[in-house]
Image (cartoon, grey):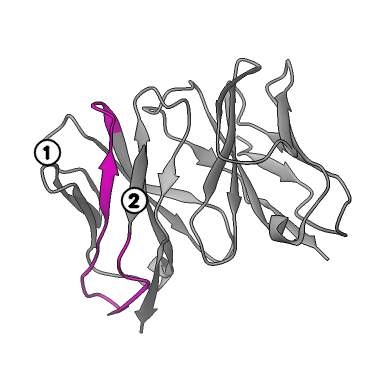
Amino acid sequence: AQTVTQSQPEMSVQEAETVTLSCTYDTSESDYYLFWYKQPPSRQMILVIRQEAYKQQNATENRFSVNFQKAAKSFSLKISDSQLGDAAMYFCATAGGTSYGKLTFGQGTILTVHP
Amino acid sequence: DAGVTQSPTHLIKTRGQQVTLRCSPISGHKSVSWYQQVLGQGPQFIFQYYEKEERGRGNFPDRFSARQFPNYSSELNVNALLLGDSALYLCASSFLGSGANVLTFGAGSRLTVL
């Protein structure tokens, strides 16, 4: 069984500043993957970043990076140099290596970016 | 290249009716997953199909069914609609069926049950 918890229903940040979104998870899988997805008002879920749990190195994608703490089962997302287009709902999710396309999502964090 | 396409984008049904939602995966993708997203919540897994076979099923009643066609497109059917079935239904595709593969999502079908 897998669970994902996002404890921040809403976050806000000033344009050009940095914000961190929190996520904790629990899984019975030994091989698993972690994801952050972004869902703007257009509804389409867009992958932001992906982390393989067997890798110790934190994933980065341009202005987006994660802090993956495997022992603590924590997977936070840092957005640097925030832009107005970053405003969206952000979902943390996990999938087992053999879970056949089943993602378990958290409840989401609404990010507001102020100009 | 076309992304994951879903139809219809919006629809309104009444309680007790049946609905069919359609999904076309990205060309070359063999796996399709369906998710239900109730307003203000994260998506919940309903089904996954890979190579036309059901590979996973979430905690949804038997009123929910799906299938995948030889061209890898998929349909989600919901019978005997309830008010609680009102949600955004998301389809996602990936090349393979394992959790290692990144899912690409469509824009969803918004179902309102009156």
Q: Which residue is mark 1?
A: A57
**Magenta-colored stretch includes residue A78:** no
- Please tell me whether residue B87 is drawn above or below residue A59 in the rendered image: below
Q: Residue drawn at (86%, 45%), measured in percent from left and top?
A: B18
Disc 1 chain ID: A
Residue B72 picture location, percent across and down: 68, 22
Disc 2 target residue: A4
Q: Who is closer to the viewer here, A30 or A66?
A: A30
Q: Which residues are magenta?
A: A6-32
Judged from the image, the secondary structure of the residue bearing numbered disc 2 is strand
Amino acid beneath label 2: Val
A78 relative to A93 in the view: left or right: left
Question: Which is nearer the eye, B39 or A26?
Answer: A26
Q: Residues within 10 Å of mark 1 (few under 14, many from 20)?
A: few
Toward the front, the furthest residue is: B61
- x and y percentages locating residue A106 in the rendered image: 39, 55
- Relative placement, left or right, of A115 versus B91 is left
Chain under numbered label 2 = A
The alpha-carbon separation of the residues under discs 2 and 1 comes to 21 Å
Tell me if mark 2 has few (under 14), some (14-19) or many (20+) residues whose alpha carbon lies within 10 angstroms of its own.
many
Hey, which quadrant is residue B79 in on the image?
A: top right
Left or right relative to B113: residue B32: left
The residue sitting at 62% across, 39% down in the picture is: B4
